[in-house]
Amino acid sequence: MAAERGTPAEALVGQVVLPGDLLLLPAHYDEDAEGERLRLSGGAAPQGRLLCGPGLRRSGAGLLVTTCGLLRHRPGGGGAYWVDSQQKRYVPVKGDHVIGIVTAKAGDVFRLDVGGSEPASLSYLAFEGATKRNRPNVQVGDLIYGQFVVANKDMEPEMVCIDSSGKSSGMGIIGQDGFLFKVSLGLIRKLLAPKCEIIQELSQLYPFELVIGMNGRIWVKAKTVQQTLIIVNILEACEYMTAEQRKQALAKLSGN
Amino acid sequence: FMQRGLDSQTKKQLEEEEKKIINEEHWYLDVPDLKEKESCIIEERSFLRCEDLVYGRMSFKGFNPEIEKLMIQMNSKCKEEEIEEDDKMEADVSDEEMARRYETLVGTIGKKFLRKRDQRVLKDDEEEDDEVAEGNNTRPSKRAKKMFLKPQD
């Protein structure tokens, strides 16, 4: 096998990368002592560690690309590189907030379907204020918003509905009514970006409530069924509409 | 108590002897330690750390007030610099009102915890303040009441 020459990572930011590409990192991430000397002398060396995000793997001198997509870079906080790819199938990742559907109760543990390869488990003690006598009122078919505490390829994923300080902070059983639907993971990330235009424009329309799970599931609830369905249709169509088309559609709706 | 000291000393001696025995028997590698390379690269499989995503639960136009409060809380955790500026703005009661209330509060609640004698003194003090303008006649009589009167033989 011919050895591939890597290209510097900075040159490919914002461009399409394919699995197997090797990205070289600047000298100050080298693990040798020479790298340290360079770090000390170079004033512009970023402090902290480089984050190698989803789609990239550490390999020897640089990063190896494992999924096809666009290479993204974030300079703040030590720098981060990741591959922005489109996916519909979710792979459980530790720390992600997801919406799960309760499929079974097995003794002290609930089985949730999160859209991954295995059902996740959720203990009944993992809710805020739950004790052995004070059990949460969870039935089969309920929707639950929680985060993964264990999620790797060797073990069954486990979820909890409290954070590290014991507070629920919005997690737990999602209430009655509302509509659950599935979108691609790329749209979810777009919607959860800090200043998302889609969400800002939608929030001007009617009062509604929205829960976005990183596993591609969105739950919407508005005052009437019609409003709920309108929001659902807009969110589903957003993936393929340009900004102008979206604004036209919203203008028609607010006019009505 | 000297006995306990002795016991700990003997324990230490025993431990040292055990360690010596173990060290002689232990197998160890003659190879020099490989330097652990401190990697400067962290592998992360979650998009959350890369992209600064917002919290997933949202509510708009007052549909669910608890979640709207939560949104402000969660999103302000990310932007901690703004919190310090906003604390003063977000106080429900202004500083002036707080000062005014404290003046009246401290007096009223302080009275609650005084013993009976001190309460009477307080009342007298307040009445004295009011009556200073009118005259000082009432003072000596009240004071006289409190003092112990020796029974006249």
Image (cartoon, coloured by chain):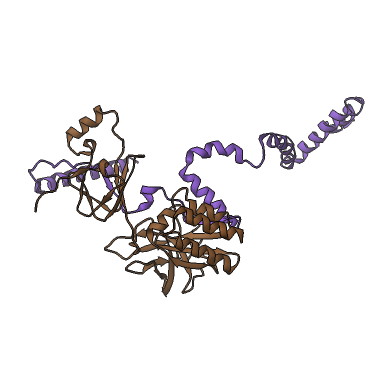
Q: Position of residue B148 (x, y in %)?
A: 83, 32
Q: Residue at x 49, y 65 (%)?
A: A233
- Is residue B32 or residue B145 the one in the foreground? B32
Q: Position of residue A132 (x, y in %)?
A: 47, 67
- Is residue B42 or residue A242 the one in the foreground? A242
In the rendered view, tell whether residue A151 sits above or below residue B97. Answer: below
Any part of residue A169 in sight? no
Can you say which quadrant of the picture contains the C terminus of chain B? top right
Q: Position of residue A237 (x, y in %)?
A: 45, 62
- Is residue A79 or residue B146 the one in the foreground? A79
Q: Position of residue B71 (x, y in %)?
A: 52, 51
The number of callouts visible is 0
In the rendered view, tell whether residue A192 sits above or below residue B31. Answer: below
Image check: B60 left or right of B142? left
Image check: B137 left or right of B65? right
Q: Chain drawn brown, letter?
A: A
The color chain B is rendered in: purple
Q: Residue at x 37, y 63 (%)?
A: A158
Give the farthest residue toward the left. Answer: B30
Any part of residue B142 in sight? yes
Can you say which quadrant of the picture contains the N terminus of chain B? top left
Image check: A165 left or right of A56? right
